[in-house]
Each structure stands twice: as structure tokens, then as C-alpha cells.
Amino acid sequence: MKKFRNDGDFDLFLGENPSLAESSVAQPGDELVEKFICKIQTYELEKSRCKNLPDPIEEIKRVMRRKGLTNNDLKPCIGSSGNVCDILMRRRPLSLRMIRNLHNFLGIPAEILIQPY
């Protein structure tokens, strides 16, 4: 059983396993039911955790606006002007070094910056 990455995966799984929706067919202790319950719990936990954290790029931009910073002010954290632009335009992912630097410079929690975007 593969991991649910989004609501579409979840719906597809339910469509392929309609007996799971019928309580008279699926009984507690069934291996498939137990796996399904575990997958749902994991998926819901990850989904709720992601919803509670702001998008990393939007958070960087918000803190920059609040502090009156420009893209050039991020060069010591990210590198060249081109790198800063690529990061803010989502064309390039943040590296671990960049995450550490932005965390120290902007005060954004690392758990926000480490999220995929």
C-alpha cells in the first residue's frame, strides 16, 4: 500500500477498495483495514501539520516587508542576486546553508523554511 500524497491519492484508494467504506464487509482486525486506518492517520497528521505552517517563500517575503528589507539584503544569506531572485520566484529550492542563514538573519523558524514549496 503506497503513501497518500494528496486527496486524489486518498480518493483513488477508496475507489479501488470500496469494501472499506462498508462497515458490514470490513471488520476490525482485517489486515487491509488496519493498514488503511494507519495510512489515514498518517495522512491526516501530515496534512494538518502542513496547513498550520505558512509557506516558506511567503514567510520570507512577509518578514522582508515587515523589516523593510530588499532582495539585496538577502545576498549574504542566499548568495548572488540571481540566487535570491530564483529562490523568491520558486525556481530554486533553499539549501540547508540558506535555511540556516535565513533563520539567523530573519528569525524565521527553521521548521517553516525546511518545508517543500
Image: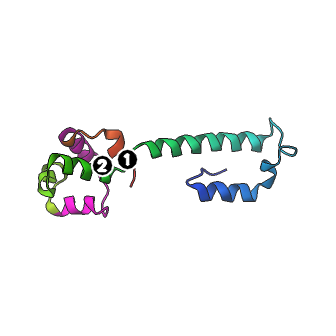
Q: Is residue 7 above or below residue 106?
A: below
Query: At x 18% / y 41%, what residue is drawn?
Result: 105
**Residue 100, magenta (yes or no):** yes
Left-right relation of 8 to 28: left
Few, some or many C-alpha atoms within 10 Å of disc 1 (few <14, some 14-19, many ≥20)? some
The residue tagged 2 is 59
**Residue type marked 2:** Glu
The residue tagged 1 is 54
| Residue stretch in magenta | 82-105
Residue 80, x across and y down, in percent: 14, 59
Which of the 4 quarters of the picture holds residue 8? Answer: bottom right
Few, some or many C-alpha atoms within 10 Å of disc 2 (few <14, some 14-19, many ≥20)? some
Q: Give 25 or 29, whichever is nearer the viewer.
A: 25
Residue 56, x across and y down, in percent: 33, 50
Characterize the magenta stretch by its predominant secondary structure. helix
Number of marks = 2
Residue 74, x across and y down, in percent: 16, 52
